[in-house]
Amino acid sequence: MDEQINYNLKQLDTWKRIFFMVVFSAIGALVRMILWAVIILQVASTLLTGKANQNVLSFGRNLSIYTYHILLFLTFNTEILPFPFSTWNLTADLQLPEK
C-alpha cells in the first residue's frame, strides 16, 4: 500500500493536473466576477430599454459555458484543458463523458 502511494505521489501527470487546477480555479474566480458584471449590465439594460442586450446576452452565454468547462476539468470529468489551452469553440461542443 505504501508503495502504491509513493508511486502515485511521483506521477508527474498528477502534479501537472494539480497545477492546472490551481490556475483554472483562479481563472474561474475571475470569470465569475465578470459574470456578475454581465448580470448587472443585463439588469440595467432591461430596466432602461425593456429588453436584454443581445451582445451582452451572447457574451454571458459564452462565459457560462466556459465556466462549465472549467468546472468539468476541476471535478475530473474531463482531461481536456479549458481555453487558452484548447480552442474557445471546444467549450460549446463539450459533452460529458459516459461512465
Image (spheres, grey):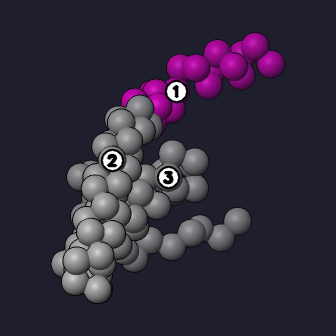
Camera-nearest residue between 45 and 93: 45
Measure the C-alpha gap from mark 2 to mark 3.
15 Å
Callout 1 secondary element: loop
Residue 15 part of the magenta segment? yes
Instruction: Using the image, determine if residue 52 lies above or below residue 7.
Output: below
Other-residue count near label 3 (Cα within 10 Å), few / some / many at <14 / 14–19 / ≥20: some
Q: Give the side of residue 55 with respect to residue 92, left or right.
A: left
Q: Position of residue 11 (x, y in %)?
A: 52, 27
Front of the two marks 2 and 1: 2
Mark 2 lies on residue? 33
Res 93 → quadrant: bottom left
Q: Is residue 53 left or right of residue 64?
A: left
- Indicate whether 95 appears above or below 81: below
Of the two numbered discs 2 and 1 on the same chain, state the one appearing first in sequence.
1
Amino acid type of the residue that numbered disc 2 sits on in the rendered structure:
Met
- Badge 1, how many Cα within 10 Å: few under 14, some, many 20+? few
Observer-side mark, 1 or 3, equals 3
Residue assigned mark 3: 71
Q: Which residue is mark 1?
A: 11
Q: Secondary structure at mark 2?
A: helix
- Could you tell me residue 63's position as x and y percent? 32, 63
The residues colored magenta run 1-19
> Going 59% across and 68% down the picture, which residue do you hit?
97
- Mark 2: few/some/many CA within 10 Å (<14, 14-19, 20+): few
> Residue extending furthest front?
48
Q: Secondary structure at mark 3?
A: helix
- The residue shown at (33%, 69%) is 43
- Say if 16 sits above or below 45 in the image: above
The answer to whether residue 14 is above or below residue 98 is: above
